[in-house]
Amino acid sequence: MDRTATARRLRQTQTTPEARLWALVRGRQLEGYKFRRQVPIDRYFADFACIEARLVVELDGAVHDDEEVELGDMARTEVLESCGYVVLRFRNEAVMSDPGGVAEAIIVALRSARP
C-alpha cells in the first residue's frame, strides 16, 4: 500500500465535518500550531495531527456508535498513544453544531502540551 497515495485520497474525499475542522485548524490558526490532515502514524492515518504538540484529533460519525467499530477506535487510540500522541475525539455533530467549542477544547490540549 502506498501510504502517500492513501493519505492524498483521504484528503481529497474528506467529509463535511472534516472540512469544517480543517478550516478551524489550518494555517496555524490555533495558538500558532501547525496541523496536518490524514497523517500516517504506525498503521493508521490520523484525521488531524499536530506533530509539535504530539496531538491527534479524530472525528467520529454515526458509524462509530457500532460496538465493533468502537472497540476498533479504542485499539486505534491505544496505538496512537503508544506512539506518544494525546488523542482527542469529537463527534461530527459537535464540529458542525459547535465548532468554537471544539476549537477551544483543542486549544486547551495544545496549551497543556507546552513544555
Image (tube, grey):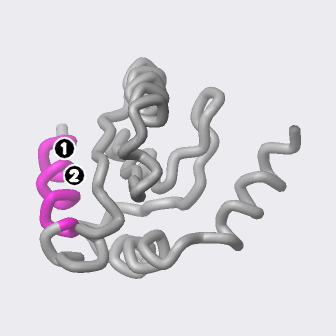
- The residue range painted magenta reads 102-114
Question: Toward the viewer: 53 or 60?
Answer: 60
Q: Residues within 10 Å of mark 2 (few under 14, many from 20)?
A: many
Residue 43 sits inside the magenta stretch: no
Q: Residues within 10 Å of mark 1 (few under 14, many from 20)?
A: few
Vertical side of 62 occupied by 88: above or below = above
* Residue ID at (23%, 76%): 99
| SS type, badge 1 | loop
Instruction: Identify the main secondary structure in magenta.
Output: helix
Image x and y of residue 69, in percent:
47, 35
Residue 108 sits inside the magenta stretch: yes
The answer to whether the residue labelled 1 contacts the one labelled 2, judged by CB atoms less than 8 Å apart, is yes
Which labelled disc corresponds to residue 8?
A: none
Image x and y of residue 36, in percent:
52, 60
The image quadrant that residue 70 belongs to is: top left
The image quadrant that residue 92 belongs to is: bottom left
| SS type, badge 2 | helix
Q: Is residue 98 visible?
A: yes
Vertical side of 52 occupied by 17: above or below = below
Which residue is labeled 1 in the image?
A: 114
Question: Toward the viewer: 80 or 97?
Answer: 97
Q: How many marks?
A: 2
Q: The residue under label 1 is which amino acid type? A: Arg
Which labelled disc corresponds to residue 110?
A: 2
Q: Is residue 97 left or right of residue 60?
A: left
Question: Toward the viewer: 31 or 100?
Answer: 100
Q: Residue furthest front?
A: 66
Q: The residue under label 2 is which amino acid type? A: Leu
Q: Residue furthest right?
A: 1
Image x and y of residue 14, in percent:
59, 70
Q: Give the label, 1 or 2, closer to the camera.
A: 2
The image quadrant that residue 5 belongs to is: bottom right
